[in-house]
Image: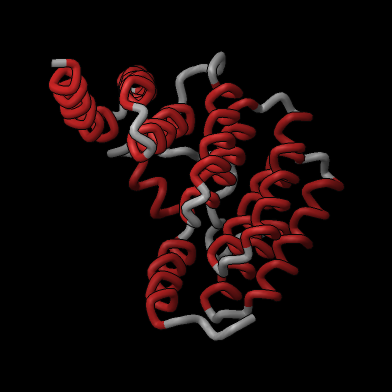
């Protein structure tokens, strides 16, 4: 593993402060925003459960740039979750390992690990979890400017969550797909995706997402109308 650049070190510091604060921070935020609480948030530093302590330790490893130890502790937590048949937590922890690989620009390892999460979510029939993991693969390719690959995975994510109940993950999948279509000059499809995101944000009561996306829709409508004329 190469040394972390200064810019990445700053990101690590910010993320680690959030991770170390653990659940208490997110409980506070939940009063003001619609946040996704599904067991993937880093447990408090005084967690009593062994698997939770391993995840907390992995977060601390990340803070101290102990990348290999972080992966090792996440994997130990997965073993415990699997023994307990808590496959949902195992899947989310695989997503966390994928995020680590992504952070260190290990694209192949990140995609492979996200796919392990996808497989778990599929077995659980967890459409939201599956869509989230697929979206992360799309994000991975988007950040490396592999637009065709990104579009393929965003499409898979959107298809998976299509029949799922309104959820912030579902809204974000549509929003991200909208940005992909906008970047690739597919304006009609971008409008459709952004509108789906807006409707979902509205249904879950998340005004921040709704308000942020509304100007984008109006701008694209104006652009579309101008091009047609």
Residue that appears at 13% across and 22% down: 226
In the rendered structure, the answer to whether residue 71 lies left or right of residue 168 reads right
Q: Nearer the viewer, residue 202 or 226?
A: 226
Q: Position of residue 130 (x, y in %)?
A: 64, 33
Position of residue 179 relative to residue 90, above or below, is above
In the rendered structure, the answer to whether residue 33 lies left or right of residue 26 reads left
Q: Is residue 192 visible?
A: yes
Q: Is residue 34 visible?
A: no
Residue that appears at 47% across and 38% down: 36
Residue that appears at 59% across and 83% down: 2
In the rendered structure, the answer to whether residue 50 lies left or right of residue 4 reads right
Position of residue 176 relative to residue 166, above or below, is below
Q: Quadrant of the N terminus?
A: bottom right
Q: How is the image coloured?
A: secondary structure
Q: Position of residue 153 (x, y in %)?
A: 58, 36
Q: Quadrant of the C terminus?
A: top left
Q: Which quarter of the figure has residue 98?
A: bottom right
Q: Nearer the viewer, residue 93 or 173?
A: 173
Position of residue 16 relative to residue 133, above or below, is below
Q: Position of residue 76 (x, y in %)?
A: 78, 62
Q: Which quarter of the figure has residue 18?
A: bottom left
Q: Residue furthest bottom?
A: 3
Q: Which quarter of the figure has residue 121?
A: top right
């Amino acid at each position: 593993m190469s040394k972390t650049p200064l810019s990445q070190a700053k990101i690590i510091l910010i993320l680690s402060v959030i991770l170390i604060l653990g659940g208490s921070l997110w409980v506070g935020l939940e009063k003001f925003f619609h946040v996704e609480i599904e067991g993937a948030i880093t447990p408090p530093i005084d967690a009593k459960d062994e698997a939770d302590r391993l995840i907390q330790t992995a977060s601390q490893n990340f803070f101290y740039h102990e990348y290999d130890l972080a992966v090792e502790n996440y994997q130990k937590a997965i073993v415990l979750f699997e023994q307990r048949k808590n496959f949902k937590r195992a899947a989310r922890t695989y997503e966390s390992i994928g995020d680590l690989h992504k952070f260190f620009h290990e694209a192949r390892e990140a995609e492979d690990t996200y796919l392990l999460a996808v497989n778990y979510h599929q077995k659980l029939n967890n459409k939201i979890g599956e869509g989230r993991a697929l979206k992360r693969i799309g994000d991975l390719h988007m950040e490396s400017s592999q637009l065709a690959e990104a579009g393929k995975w965003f499409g898979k994510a959107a298809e998976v969550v299509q029949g799922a109940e309104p959820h912030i993950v579902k809204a974000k999948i549509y929003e991200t797909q909208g940005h992909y279509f906008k970047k690739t000059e597919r304006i009609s499809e971008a409008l459709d995706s952004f509108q789906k995101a807006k409707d979902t944000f509205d249904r879950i009561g998340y005004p921040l997402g709704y308000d942020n996306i509304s100007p984008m829709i109006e701008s694209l409508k104006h652009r579309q109308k101008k091009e047609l004329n």
